Image: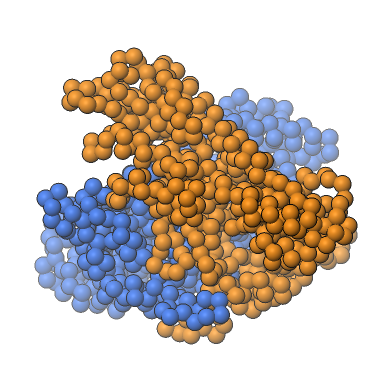
Chain colours: A blue, B orange
Amino acid sequence: MSGTDKFVEDLTDKSDDFSRWYGEVIQKAQLADYAPVRGCMVIRPYGFAIWELMQAALDKRIKDTGHQNAYFPLLIPENFLAKEAEHVEGFAPQVAWVTHGGNEKLEERLAIRPTSEAIICHMYSKWIDSHRDLPVLINQWANVMRWEKVTRLFLRTAEFLWQEGHTAHATEAESEEETLKMLEVYRDFIETEMAIPVIKGRKSEQEKFAGALRTYSVEALMSDGKGLQAGTSHNLGQHFAKVFDITFQDVDGERRHVWQTSWGVSTRLMGALIMVHGDDSGLKIPPRIAPIQAVVIPIYRKETERAEVLEASHQAASLLKAGGVRVYVDDRDQYTPGWKYNEYELRGVPLRLEVGPRDVAARQVMSVRRDNRAKEAIAWDFLAERVPMVLEEVQKALFQKALEFRESSTRSAATLDELDVVVSEHRGFVRAYWCGRNSCEDQVKARCAATIRCLPLDDHSEPGKCVVCGADAPHRVLFAKSY
Amino acid sequence: MSGTDKFVEDLTDKSDDFSRWYGEVIQKAQLADYAPVRGCMVIRPYGFAIWELMQAALDKRIKDTGHQNAYFPLLIPENFLAKEAEHVEGFAPQVAWVTHGGNEKLEERLAIRPTSEAIICHMYSKWIDSHRDLPVLINQWANVMRWEKVTRLFLRTAEFLWQEGHTAHATEAESEEETLKMLEVYRDFIETEMAIPVIKGRKSEQEKFAGALRTYSVEALMSDGKGLQAGTSHNLGQHFAKVFDITFQDVDGERRHVWQTSWGVSTRLMGALIMVHGDDSGLKIPPRIAPIQAVVIPIYRKETERAEVLEASHQAASLLKAGGVRVYVDDRDQYTPGWKYNEYELRGVPLRLEVGPRDVAARQVMSVRRDNRAKEAIAWDFLAERVPMVLEEVQKALFQKALEFRESSTRSAATLDELDVVVSEHRGFVRAYWCGRNSCEDQVKARCAATIRCLPLDDHSEPGKCVVCGADAPHRVLFAKSY
C-alpha cells in the first residue's frame, strides 16, 4: 500500500494532541480507514491481523469454558426489540432500520442488530424445553450496528465487530456464576494477551445494560488518563425469559423461567491497545497478538555485501519460523534501513533484528526492542531460543509499565471539590465513597464529567461517607472521565 | 438441546422425498433453524462447528497463497452500487435497504451488501497509487444479504455467510492467473476437505457475475442428480476500475487502470455437504471437517459393569485426543446405546467406538464406520495409530463414492430431444455441444429447465454440432438442472 513514505516524520506528539495522535497512528500504521458511510470503518489487513490474533486467543478461552459458537440473523423484527421495555428504550434511538427488500416495502421494519438478545431469546424459547437442555452456552462472533452521532475509529463506530455470549441456566446462582466466570475470562484475556491491566467491577444501576439485572465490566485506563470499558458481562436475570417466554420443565416437574447472561467485547479493544501502549513513535503491539513479532532488516552498503547479508537474514528468519516466531524479512531495496526502522516502530513490531556485514562475520544478529529500545547481540546458535524469551520479556514489560501508570494515576478523593480537582488536573482513576443514590452520581457527572466506571470487586475498604452528600456509603467506587 | 429423542425414527427416506429429507436432516441434526425473519436462518452450534472447520481449512489456503484478511463495511451507499451498470442491474432487485438511522430518515438509502465490489473498489481507489502498491490481495469473511423470493436453508437464504476475495493487479495476465489460481484453491479445498468432486469451468455470458469480464466456477453434482455451483472466481477486467477510477502509475510513468478479480464461496457449501454425502440415516460428515470425528459409546447392562466401561471409554478418548482426534464420549445415562447409535449416525459422525465389558476384557474397542458400517476391533495399543488411518480411509471413500456417482450420472446428448430425455429421466450432468449463442442456451432452459453449468476447462473434445441448432460448436459444455 502506498503513502507510508512520509508518515513517520509527520506523527503528532502524543503529549501535544492525544486525539490527533490516535487518529494518525491508526491511519499511518494502516490499521483502519474511514468508510464512505458516516461513522463506519474499514479494518485494513494489518489491523485485522491483530484482531484475528485477539479473536483466536479469546475464542479458545470461550470454548475451553464449555461454550459453542453459532450464528444468528443480522435482522431483528421491530416487535421483538420492543418486547423488553428497558431494552428497547436503551437501543431504539441507535437502530438502523431496513424498510425495503428489493423493490417492496416491508410490512414490518427490521432492525440491524444493535445486540442480539431479542432474536436469540426468541430462538431459545423454541429450543429449550427441559432441565436436560440446560445450560445453553452459546457465543457468536458478529457485526453489530449502533447509529452513533459522534464516532471515532475503533472506539465508537456505527458498525463494529464483536463477540456476544448468550447463556441460559436453571438457577440464579448458576447465571451469576457464569456472569462472573466470563468477566474473569475477559480479565485474563485482556491482561495476558493484550498486556492491559483491568479492574473488575459492577456497574451502577444507571450504567448497566438496558434490560439486565446486574452488569459487570472490566475497566482499563488509557495513557491520557481516561477510562475505557473494555468488556461487559451481564446477569440478565429472568427479564428476557419472561417476555420471550423461555421456560423449562424442572426436575420437580414444575415449569420455570430460565436465568440468562450475556457478555461481549468488541473491536473497541483495538482502540485500547493503541491508547495504552503507543508512544510518539507509534504503536507498541504486545508480542502475543503481534502479526509480525520480529522484523529482520538487512543492512548493506556495497553490492558485494548484499548477497551474504540477504542470505543471513533469510536464514535467521527460517530459524525463528521453525521456533514458532512470526517473523518477516523486509528485503525491499527501495527503502533505507533507517526508513524501515521508523516504519516498524510506527507499526509497533515488538522486536527488530538488524543483520549487517559485521553481524554476518560474527554469526549474530543485533536485536532492538520496540518498548525500551534495548539492544542485544544474539548469537545465531541461540536465536530460536533467545528471541521467544525476549518477546516474553517485552510482553511482561508492557503490562508492567501499564500497571505502574495506572497505579500512579489512581487517586482518592473525600469531597466533591477534591474529586473535581483530581479529575480535572490529574485525570486518571479516582477511588471515592458513594452512597448509591442516582442523584449523587449525577452531580459528579454534572460537576466534572466523570462517571462511575464500576464498583470494584476487589474493594474491601471499610464503609465511609459519600463524596457528594456525606451520607453513609457502603464502599468506594471508581470514578473517571471515560471513552 | 431438546427434541432429538424421537427424531431418527421419523427421518423421511431420501428416495421418497429428497427435498423433505434435506430439510429434516438439517433440523434433526440441529445444523440450522429458520429465523423469524423471512428467508433468514440460524446456524446452530453443530452446524457452525462444521462451518468453522471449513473456514479454517480454506482460510489457511487463502493465506498460503499470499492473501490477507480485512473487513469492509456492511452498508453501501446507493450511488456506489449504481456506478457499474451491469452490477446494479444484477443486484438491485435483491437488495435490502436501510432508510432510517435512529429516528432520522437518511439522505441516501444504504444497501446491505449483496457483495462488496462497490465499497471495496471505492477504498482501493484511495489506497492504490503506484505499481509498487500492486498486487493488492485481500479477502474478507462476512455476512451478505440478498432478498430472495424462494429460500431454502443453506442453499438460498436472504442472509448468508461467505468469504469474498478482492484483488487488484497491474496486468490482465496477472488478473487471469489469480482468477484461475483461486478456482484451483476452491477445487482443492472442496475435494480434499469436503470430499466433494467438482468440475472447473467457465460460465456462459448469461450466467456470469454481474459486472465481470469472465466468471469461472466449480460445479458439483448432488445425489439427487441436480447440479450446484460450489464456488465462483471472477476476472472483473477493468470494468470496476474504470467507474471507480482505480489507477496506478506504472513503471513507465503512465497512469493505468488496475485489473481486478473477485471470488467467493459461502455457507451454501453446507447444503452441498448434506446433499452429496447424506443417506436415509442422516448426515455423513467427511472426517476432516467433522466436529466429532469419533464418538465413544459405553455399553453396559449391570451396575457392576458401569465403572470399568466408563473408565475404559474415557481412557480410550484420552488416547485419541492425544493423537489429535476430535473425540467425544457420550456417557449420558438417560439414553440407550441403540438410541445413541442412531443419534450419531443422524449427525454424521464418521466413526463410532463401542466399549462394552467384553471389549474391556479384551483390551479393545469395536469401531463402526458411518459411511459403510464396516466393523473392526481395534486393540487399545493401536488406537491412537489406527483411528486416524480409518478416518483417512473414510475421507477417501466418501470422495470416491461421490466421484463414482458423478461419473455414472454424466451422460451425453446430441440433440435437444435427447438432452431433454436425459435431463428429465436420469437427471445428472449432460455433456453436449453448444454453439455459443444465447438463444440456444435459452431454448434448452425453456425445454427442460436445464442450464449451462459451465464450459469445463478439462474438455478437450473436437469441435462438433450444437445440440440445439446444429451449427458448428467449438466444444462441449455441461448442462444440468441445478440448485
Q: Tell me the residue at 61%/53% (across/down).
A: B226
Q: Tell me residue B69's x, y (percent).
A: 59, 53
Q: Tell me residue A132's x, y (percent).
A: 23, 47
Residue furthest to the top: B362
Task: Answer with left or right where residue B42 lies relative to residue B398.
Answer: left
Give the camera-side residue of A77 and A195.
A77
Image vertical order of residue B317 relative to residue B150, above or below: above
Task: Answer with left or right where residue A136 lies relative to residue B481.
Answer: left
Hey, which quadrant is residue B211 in on the image? Answer: bottom right
Q: Tell me residue A81's x, y (percent).
A: 34, 73
Q: Tell me the residue at 35%/27% (across/down).
A: B354
Quadrant including the C terminus of chain A: bottom left
Task: Answer with left or right where residue A119 lies relative to residue B302.
Answer: right
Give the camera-side residue of B58 and A455.
B58
| Residue A295 shows up from this direction | no
| Residue B196 shows up from this direction | yes
